[in-house]
Structure formats: structure tokens, C-alpha cells
Image (tube, rainbow, N blue to C red):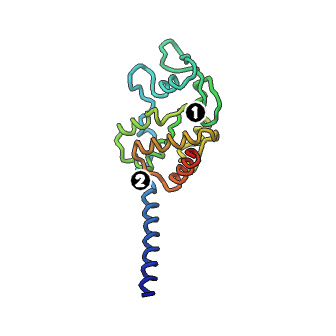
Amino acid sequence: MKNILLFMLLALSLLSGCQSLLKSAESIPITDIPYQRKDWPHWIDADRNCRNTRQELLIAASKIPVQFKDKRQCTVKTGLWSGPYTGKQFIRASDVDIDHIVPLAHAHRHGASQWTRTQRRTFANDFENLLVVDDAINQAKSDKAPHEWLPPNKVFWCEYGRRWQRVKDKYRLRYSAPERDVLKQLAAICYR
């Protein structure tokens, strides 16, 4: 009887170890298709009014009426934007980037490599996944997930985590285990 119990305990521990390995394997981004930004049509002019997604977001996010580069009013020159990642304010459109909260390369590695060009275009231009940010901080973030990078402005961490998760869930993108752990930690802090 003692041997049977020992065998069952050993089998259960092996099984639980295998299950955690399987869960980890599910979260590993697997794709043999290399990421290429050109495969993600972004900054499109969907309504054909000469303003692409970047310009539309700059207009929508500015705290004051924007000024345009010329009388055609296609390209924003100035406005007033508050970068949520740093809390800094910006006046010149050339000083800001539009950040994909869930970066295109990250999405590619976590399920989007199999998407059609139309699906990639939708994702790349989805306002829910876009923020006006400091151009230097956007480059520092690159294609990192929350377990690798969080905004320097800690006040924005909760909103960042919520938006990251909302976008990943909306597009049914896979999570890595470390990414999910950090999002759980953020949720625990944010929803106390």
C-alpha cells in the first residue's frame, strides 16, 4: 500500500509538472514568419480627408485646437499633448510619436503572424491601441511587453495595464507567462 501511495504521489507531481510545462509552452510565441513592419499598413487615410491615422489622433488628443502646416489642413504642426508615459507636455507635433500600446512586432510574435493584411491594417490603426507619446520614450519602449517595460510615469501604470490587456484580449493575442504575471500584479495594485 505504501508503494502505491508513493507511486501515486510521484505520478501526481510529474503530472502537475507537465501541466505547468504545457501552460508555459502555450505562452511561448511561436512563429517562423519574420516580422516586417511593411506588412502592417499603418497611418492610413481611412476617410480620405487627407489626414492619416497619425494626424487624426493628434487632432483628437490635443488639449487645444491644432495648427496645420498649410491651408490644406492635412498635417498637424502644433497642438498641446500630454504624454502619459512621462507626464511631459508637447507643443510641436514633430516632438511626439504615436505608440502602439501593444507593439506590432509583439502582436506578430503572439498570434498575429497568421493574420491577413486587412487584419493587420485594422490592428495598426486602432485608436484603442494608440497613444500620443514622447518620441524618445517610444523608442526606448520598442516592442517590449509589460514585464520588460513600464512607463516611467507610475501614475499611468494601471491604465497602461488595462489597455494592454484590453487590446490583447480584443485581438485574441497570446500572453507569455511573465507578461501575465506582471499584469496580475498591476491588477492587484490597481484594484485594491
Q: Secondary structure at mark 1?
A: strand
Q: Is 144 placed above or below 178 here?
A: above
Q: Residue at x 55, y 39 (%)?
A: 159
Question: Can you say whether 117 is above or below 176 in the image?
Answer: above
Q: Which quadrant: the N terminus? A: bottom left
- Label 2 packing within 10 angstroms: few (<14), some (14-19), many (20+): some
Which of the labelled discs sits on residue 31, or is there none? 2
Q: Which percent across, then down, holds residue 178?
A: 53, 55
Q: Quadrant of residue 136?
A: top right
Q: Residue at x 45, y 30 (%)?
A: 43
39 or 108: nearer the viewer: 108
Horizontal and vertical percent position of residue 110: 44, 50
Mark 1 or mark 2: which is in front? Answer: 1
Task: Locate residue 134: give its quadrant.
Answer: top right
Q: Is residue 118 left or right of residue 158?
A: left
Q: Which residue is mark 1?
A: 133
SS of the residue at dot 2? loop
Determine the image quadrant of residue 84.
top right
Q: Residue furthest front?
A: 192
142 and 190: which is toward the camera = 190
Q: Nearer the viewer, residue 159 or 138?
A: 159
Residue 82: x and y in percent read: 60, 29
Mark 1 or mark 2: which comes first in sequence?
A: 2
Name the amino acid, label 2: Thr
Q: How many marks?
A: 2
Q: What's the amino acid at mark 1?
A: Val
Q: Position of residue 45 (x, y in %)?
A: 41, 25
Query: Rounded to the nearest whole Å, what is the CA distance between mark 1 and mark 2?
Result: 30 Å
Q: Which mark is residue 77?
A: none
